[in-house]
Image (spheres, rainbow, N blue to C red):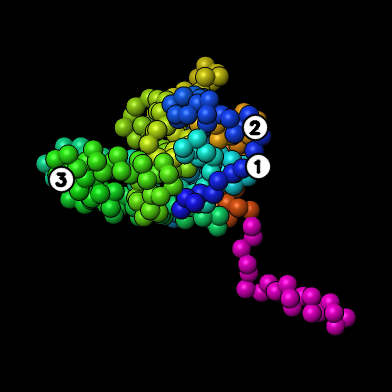
């Protein structure tokens, strides 16, 4: 019994067979291109800032993705040891670029856990809090400290990562290590637009449980823009594990994902679509009691 997911057994024979036909994640990778309407997202970000609320491209993308995943939960499945699991949480990992004390660039990876009651604002605040906490040159997060420890003793790193892999393979990896690992994630995002670089198609790691990897590239002119138009789009390079969902299910998911990005204002309320309780709302039991009195 894995600490991060539950085995899914009520699947068709062909779906159950896929992890045996394609046992490795790099066997099962599909590549796709998508685009964010940069004019819509940028206008939304500017409007929110005028209102005193900070949102970013990363938080808008993560909120749009998670909202679509709540409607299409199979994109949050993962494969381990040729078995298909339903993940019992949702998280996304991303890379943070920072500088060392001597000024040389350095990277660290961060992971954000999301909840159905989240909105684009709570996600943005959580991401920014993590960035602020980990941007210091001398700061090492728990993931960095674990890696530093593994490489501290000659020969230890090879054994440590072999042991983690074997424990993970057999469902014995402690949840604490899974929570630290950026490779055990629903979604991995890299924002190459932040360093003015074109998008790429980044592989899903064989180590861990990454199901989908999205790369955000620097904005470019709309392909169908008329002469004189200045409209832009942000290209997305998407790589996905085809074993966790069928083509139809992926198509429905990405249709919802695109729809959310075109209307970012829909991300301002609970992403699961539930309504927040109000102070004056009458509890269901009270309403039922009132009907009984009548």
Res 10 label: 1
Which numbered mark, 2 or 3, is in the foreground of this view? 2
Q: Secondary structure at mark 2?
A: helix
Q: Residues within 10 Å of mark 2 (few under 14, many from 20)?
A: few
Q: Report how far apart the C-alphas of labels 2 and 3 lie in the structure.
A: 46 Å
How many marks the image carries: the answer is 3
| Magenta stretch contains residue 278 | yes
Left/right placement of residue 277 relative to residue 152 reads right
The residue at 14%/40% (across/down) is 154
Label 3 Cα crowd, 10 Å radius (few <14 / some 14-19 / many 20+) = few
Magenta span? 274-294
Q: Residues within 10 Å of mark 1 (few under 14, many from 20)?
A: few
Q: Residue at x 26, y 43 (%)?
A: 160
Q: Which residue is disc 3 drawn over?
A: 152
In the foreground, 75 or 270 = 75
Residue 27, placed above or below residue 61: above
Q: Residue furthest left?
A: 102
* Position of residue 18 measured from the top left corner of the image (x, y, whole percent): 56, 29
Membership of 285 in magenta stretch: yes
186 vs 287: above or below: above
Label whose residue precedes the other's in the sequence (1 or 3): 1
Q: Is residue 37 above or below residue 59?
A: above
User: Which element carries disc 1, helix, strand or loop?
Assistant: loop
Say which of 109 and 216 sits in front. 109
Kindly identify which residue carries mark 2.
13
Q: CA distance from mark 1 to mark 3?
A: 45 Å
Q: Is residue 10 visible?
A: yes
Q: In percent of the image, x 63 and y 53: which residue is there?
A: 273
Q: Quadrant of residue 153?
A: top left
> How far apart are labels 1 and 2 at the CA level?
9 Å
Q: On the image, which quarter does residue 133 sit in?
A: bottom left
């Amino acid at each position: 019994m894995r600490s991060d997911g539950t085995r899914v057994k009520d699947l068709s024979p062909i779906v159950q067979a896929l992890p045996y036909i394609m046992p490795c994640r790099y066997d099962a990778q599909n590549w796709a291109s998508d685009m964010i309407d940069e004019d819509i997202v940028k206008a939304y970000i500017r409007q929110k800032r005028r209102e005193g609320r900070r949102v970013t491209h990363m938080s808008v993308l993560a909120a749009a993705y998670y909202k679509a995943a709540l409607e299409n939960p199979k994109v949050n499945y993962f494969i381990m040891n040729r078995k298909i699991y339903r993940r019992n949480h949702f998280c996304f990992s991303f890379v943070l670029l920072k500088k060392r004390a001597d000024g040389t660039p350095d990277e660290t990876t961060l992971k954000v856990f999301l909840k159905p009651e989240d909105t684009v604002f709570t996600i943005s605040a959580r991401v920014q809090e993590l960035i602020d906490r980990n941007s210091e040159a001398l700061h090492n997060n728990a993931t960095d400290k674990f890696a530093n420890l593994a490489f501290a003793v000659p020969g230890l790193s090879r054994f440590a990562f072999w042991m983690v892999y074997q424990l993970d393979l057999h469902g014995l990896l402690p949840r604490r290590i899974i929570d630290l690992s950026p490779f055990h994630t629903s979604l991995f995002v890299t924002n190459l637009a932040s360093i003015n670089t074109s998008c790429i198609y980044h592989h899903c790691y064989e180590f861990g449980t990454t199901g989908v990897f999205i790369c955000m590239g620097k904005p470019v002119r709309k392909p169908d823009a008329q002469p004189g138009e200045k409209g832009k789009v942000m290209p997305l390079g998407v790589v996905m594990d085809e074993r966790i969902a069928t083509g139809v299910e992926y198509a429905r998911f990405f249709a919802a994902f695109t729809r959310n990005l075109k209307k970012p204002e829909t991300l301002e309320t609970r992403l699961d679509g539930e309504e927040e309780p109000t102070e004056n709302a009458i509890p269901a039991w009270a309403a039922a009691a009132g009907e009984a009195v009548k």
